[in-house]
Amino acid sequence: MTDPILARIQASRAEGPRRSPLANWLLRHHEAFARILREGGANWERFAVVFVEEGLLPRPEHFDAPGPEGHKARRRVAETARKAWARTQVERGVGKSMPAPEPVTSPGLPMAAPTGSAPAETQSKAQDRLARLRRQTLDRSGRTV
Amino acid sequence: MVTRKTALVVPTDAVGSVPEMQPKLVVRLGRGRTGGTTGLDWMVQRARREGRDPIVADAARNPTLSRLYPGEALAPPSTDVVEVKDWLTSVLDCMLTEWRSAVLDLGGGQDSTLAEYVRDLDLLAFCQDVGVLPVAVYFLGPEADDFAHAHAIWREGYFNTPQTLLVLNEGVLKRGQSPAGAFQGIQANPDFVAWAEAGAIPVYMRSLAPLEAMRELDLSFGAAMADRPGKGEQKLGPTRAWQVKSWNAALEAEVREVGAWLP
């Protein structure tokens, strides 16, 4: 590398990408955190309190305040945490390593007419779904089938 | 007239065989004032509770969804067709760059813009090539025109994905209207039955009594279910929180078969 500016950029890049403490933590504990989300769902407002208390996110003004200002500040931090997680997933390439999805339609497939052409099994499933829908509307109207 | 693309291709064998992290492009089509905002908001909140982060994109004539996500929802700069089409391209770019699902509201008459967009970009072929699962959602109230409008879009055929949901929304019924009576017309309509037989999935969405209170307190579905405080440190209270939980559980049960289609 002959260009001095590029050389300096390269040298600074060698120190690693600049990430926030939370992003570093999420990357380090990606699998475990993903498991928590899968098993228990996300409560970003509560997670955000933990992240702030542990120093992974800065504590903004009004964060501990009661009332709408405090609520707004906590919501903002929760949003920051949620987005940091989303970026971590992108960085980890979640999804991109998935196998190519099954085609949802086959290009060039002859288009069937809407009525009377679906296979019997599909029609039977459809009838089940329509029957369930009828039961729902009757049930919600206080009637029985 | 039945166009080349009119009919749905028979749906994929296993509704649940979609990889969890495959981005979904969920497009809401059809008339406005049929509860689409509530339904799409629920999908976004559901995804976020499970740690996913779909893009919220709102080009509806009355952009109520984007008002729920200020500073975050993507919206076109104007209703001009050319600008909306450019904006649609930017939403797709964002999905692919960030590998995220998107919930796109094109309700309230914006479907005609999509029809024009599809002339430039075959959206279904595009989705297939880039690995995005296209999902169409039509919210239906009891009015005959709600269904007629949705069905007309389907007959046009520009977004006839095998992943199609027909959501009958109890929440838009008038006071005193019984769901069985109100939706009888749609359920008995041969076109509705044919659409379901071609693979569209009917979904029943109950009315949610505390919805207005939730909105006033600026509560998400998750916060409402947990009875967390909202605006002004006010809570819904345990009874309304239970109502939200019950409504959520009913809707979850309704979409169990097609959960993998959601963002």
Image: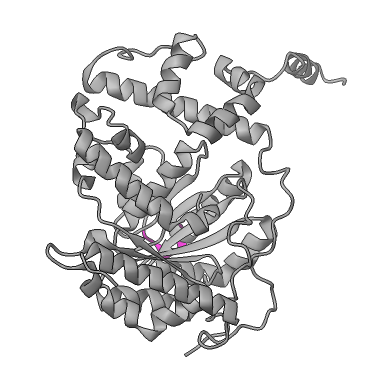
Tell whether position B81 is magenta.
yes
Q: Which quarter of the figure is the N terminus of chain A placed in?
A: top right
Is residue B198 among what the camera can see? Answer: no
* Closer to us: A122 or B102: A122
Q: Position of residue B60 (x, y in %)?
A: 35, 58
Q: Which quarter of the figure is the C terminus of chain A placed in?
A: bottom left
* Closer to us: A39 or B22: A39
Q: Point out the stretch of residues depicted in magenta.
A: B79-83
Residue furthest front as drawn: A144
The residue located at (19%, 41%) in the rendering is B213
Vertical comparison of B239 with B170: above or below? above
The residue located at (32%, 60%) in the rendering is B61
Residue furthest right as drawn: A1
Is residue B144 among what the camera can see? Answer: yes
Vertical comparison of B217 with A30: above or below? below
* Closer to us: B236 or A82: B236
Q: How is the image coloured?
A: one colour
Tell whether position B194 is magenta.
no
- The mark tally for this picture is 0
* Closer to us: B97 or B116: B97
Q: Which of the 4 image quadrants contains residue A86?
A: top right
Vertical comparison of B244 with B204: above or below? above
Left-right relation of A63 to B262? left
Q: Position of residue B144 (x, y in %)?
A: 27, 78
Q: Main secondary structure of the magenta part?
A: helix
Left-right relation of A18 to A83? right
Q: Which of the 4 image quadrants contains residue B112?
A: bottom left
Q: Position of residue A45 (x, y in %)?
A: 39, 25
Left-right relation of B4 to B68? right
The residue located at (46%, 52%) in the rendering is B103
Q: Position of residue B176 (x, y in %)?
A: 12, 65
